Amino acid sequence: MKTIRKRTGRMMVAAIGLALSAQVAAQDRVAQTVHNLSVSGPGTVRAQSETQVCIFCHAPHNTSHVKPLWNRAMSTANYTIYQSSTLDALPGQPTGASKLCLSCHDGTIALGSVLSRQDQIRMVGSDHIPAGLTNLGTDLSDDHPISFHYTSGLAASDSQLVNPLTLPAEIRLDNTGQLQCTACHDPHSNVNGDFLVRSDEFGALCRACHNMHGWGDGAHAMSTASVLGSAQMSWPYSTVAENACRSCHRSHTAGGRERLLQLEAEEDNCLVCHNGQVAQTNIEAEINKMSAHDPRSYLNVHDPTETAAGNQAHVECADCHNPHAVAHETPSGEFNYVPIGATLRKVPGISTGGAYVAEAQYEYEVCYRCHGDSPVDVRNRIPRQSQGGNLRLKFNSFNPSFHPVVASSPNPDVPSLVGGLAPGSMIRCTDCHNNDSGPGSGGGAGPQGPHGSVYDYLLERNYSTRDNTPESAYEYAMCYKCHRRASILADESFAEHNDHLQHDVSCSACHDPHGVSLTQATGSDHTHLINFDTSIVFPLTGTSQLRFRDLGRLQGSCTLTCHGQDHNGTTYGVGN
């Protein structure tokens, strides 16, 4: 019985689908569509008694002398037009066919107000177009731009626009070369739904004009994830790939006016899927954590044309991810260095020299947009002997020391490295700053990336920076991911590691995990990432001396006061 019921259910769904397809296919004549406003019209908006179909738009006599035999007055409204920092076109007030469409769709003129009749045709219910998606109003800033010249020059200035000479036959510009409503809509035929000139399934209509770089093999273009049962927006199809552009964008009455996003807040357009309901990755759960890159803290600050964080520090999904090009990350070994991940494809960045890069080639270039020359404030930033938040300068390979993010470390004496990390190995920012429940944390199933963590500084493992912290595998788990705990406690790289740790001196008291900029290094040699935490380590009692000196291979000296104990040129290493 269960099998029979399942088959019956499938047959019913198929039958409904065929019926709807047949219904849409039958709407190839205007009389069969909701643009038939006569008493015989199939829609809820129709005349009380008028039987003529075409009269609401056309008439053979007494018209406005506007082609094609236009039977309606033109709206005198002044429209607010679409604007965007990424728009190269120059749309003005509506012209041509768009002006004709708006004589109904801006809601200012009664539907039955036609020029060939002295009396207005009365409608069932309201005489004006009802409120809703089809009533665009006079504010067109939330609608796709119209009435602009779509030229080859425009396409050349915006490499993500198709040359108009190669547009498919069904997409037509007007006789002046302008793009009007009729480029996308055929008011006489509704075969494709919404009076579209071609189907928008898989983004076919949008992609006829928009050639978004990276879309073809991107994750969103190929995702078979079902949107059924999730919080519905304007999603006419059942999967992400089928909805394509409509997954995030809406051509009319968009919530996010610039770039025509479905919802006003940029991140809401991502989180409606990345909340565990549609996408495999539940990013919403990550940004709810104590330490997070939380885009919900900002609204209408991000702009795709920005080159760096600037004066308005923020983080939006689109700062790190290009939704048109983002691709699935290929799993790799724990220490298999990859310059940049597939989720960061075609995202801008800042080079090691501080120059804007249109398409980042390294992960750190993406991070430098906010953590470089315009460093955002980091909560609980540790006070250092050599202070500075510019990570672009801290990772410079000419510095006294640096973690090998930009270049391999020249230091051959790091005996503590775990298996799989040979001297000279390189790491990425996300080897440390990542989801605490992701694969890098020790086998978690959560998503990769620095979206959120239960640990401070957005670290994937615990790293205690407090003074008087008893040493354990947990307290310094972040350090021990790459540096063998047994080696550190055995003093293989520094003769006093064990003694310091057993006296509850944290790794952070002496070491700056990013590096020490050559331009900011003061008071010490700063090799081996030595950059004292000045809330723990103080100048030598009675002096202003706070200094580390590198005396050669595995040797050095310190002049300072720590935990109440003076170190006056105290040396360590061979023979000390």
Image (cartoon, rainbow, N blue to C red):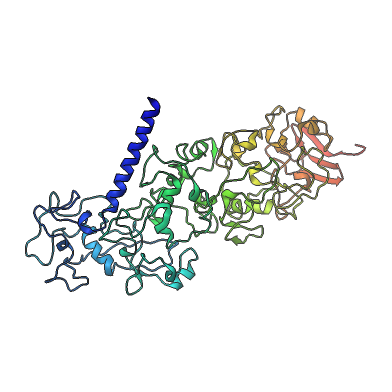
Of the 4 image quadrants, the one containing the N terminus is top left
Q: Quadrant of residue 272?
A: top left
Instruction: Tell me: 210 left or right of 96.
Output: right
Question: Percent x, y for residue 391?
Answer: 65, 50
Q: Tell me: residue 151, above or below residue 417.
A: below
Residue occupying image coordinates x 42% and y 69%:
164
Q: Is residue 266 visible?
A: no
Q: Tell me: residue 562, above or below residue 219.
A: above
Question: Percent x, y for residue 288?
Answer: 50, 36
Instruction: Tell me: 341 left or right of 574.
Output: left
- Comparing 275 with 21, the one in front is 21
Residue occupying image coordinates x 45% and y 73%:
153
- Comparing 162 with 75, the one in front is 162
- Comparing 187 with 545, the one in front is 187
Question: Percent x, y for residue 385?
Answer: 70, 45
Residue occupying image coordinates x 50% and y 60%:
305
